[in-house]
Image (cartoon, grey):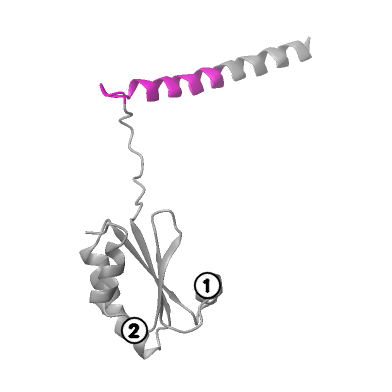
Amino acid sequence: MKLRSKLIRCLALFAVFTLLFLSADCGKALAQNKTGKSTTSRPSVFKPLVTFVEIGAASCIPCKAMQPIMKEVAEEYKGQVKVVFHDVWTKTGKQDAEKYKIRVIPTQVFLDIEGKEYFRHEGYFPKEELVKVLKIQGVK
């Protein structure tokens, strides 16, 4: 008799949780607007046309000269270009340098929207030349 009552309680709890779960799914379905798109907010994913990866070091003079250019590019082409800096003298930066097979610093690696490398430059890279490389992928 005790086993039977425990089983009934477990089934009742399971039924309650199932109903709560299903009602939450129904609430999401009701949150759709007239266009059929969900009105629940989802984080937008920034998919840049180009990812500009600068691999250098904070103590490197040509790398320091690239810092203002990187900042300008990030501001001027916000929403189209993602700028990333890896310092080779840090643990993670060293791993990134190995990943990109860096021979000298600074090195600029340009990745397309799919994350595939389409251009590489070693040394200081003037902004005017760098912008030409960005425009190859449709950056305006």
Picture layout, residue 97 above or below residue 114: below
Q: Quadrant of the N terminus?
A: top right
Q: Which residue is mark 1?
A: 92
Q: What amino acid does circle 1 point to?
A: Thr
Location of residue 6 with respect to 61 vertically, above or below? above
Q: Secondary structure at mark 1?
A: helix
Three-letter residue code for mark 2: Tyr
Residue 114 in percent (x, y) is at 43, 53
In the rendered structure, which disc, 2 or 1, sits on the residue that comes first in sequence? 1
Return the residue nearer the eye: 84 or 19. Answer: 84
Q: How many marks?
A: 2
Disc 1: CA contacts within 10 A as few (<14), some (14-19) or many (>=20): few
Residue 22, compared with residue 95, is above or below; it is above
Residue in view at x 44 percent, y 58 percent: 115
How far across and down, in percent of the image, does residue 23 sit? 45, 19
Looking at the picture, tell me which residue is in the foreground, 133 or 36: 133
Q: Position of residue 37 (x, y in %)?
A: 31, 28
The alpha-carbon separation of the residues under discs 2 and 1 comes to 22 Å
Work out which residue is located at the far front of the displayed protein and give it: 136
Q: Is residue 32 magenta?
A: yes
Q: Which residues are magenta?
A: 16-36
Label 2 neighbourhood size at 10 Å, few (<14), some (14-19), many (20+)? some
Residue denoted by label 2: 124
Magenta span has 45? no
Q: Quadrant of residue 128?
A: bottom left
At a point 54% along the width and 75% down the height, the residue shown is 101
Q: Nearer the viewer, mark 2 or mark 1?
A: 2
Which quadrant is the C terminus positioned in? bottom left
Report x, y in % for residue 62. 35, 87
**Most foreground residue, 5 or 64:** 64
- Helix, strand or loop for the magenta stretch, by majority: helix
The part of the image, by quadrant, that contains residue 138 is bottom left
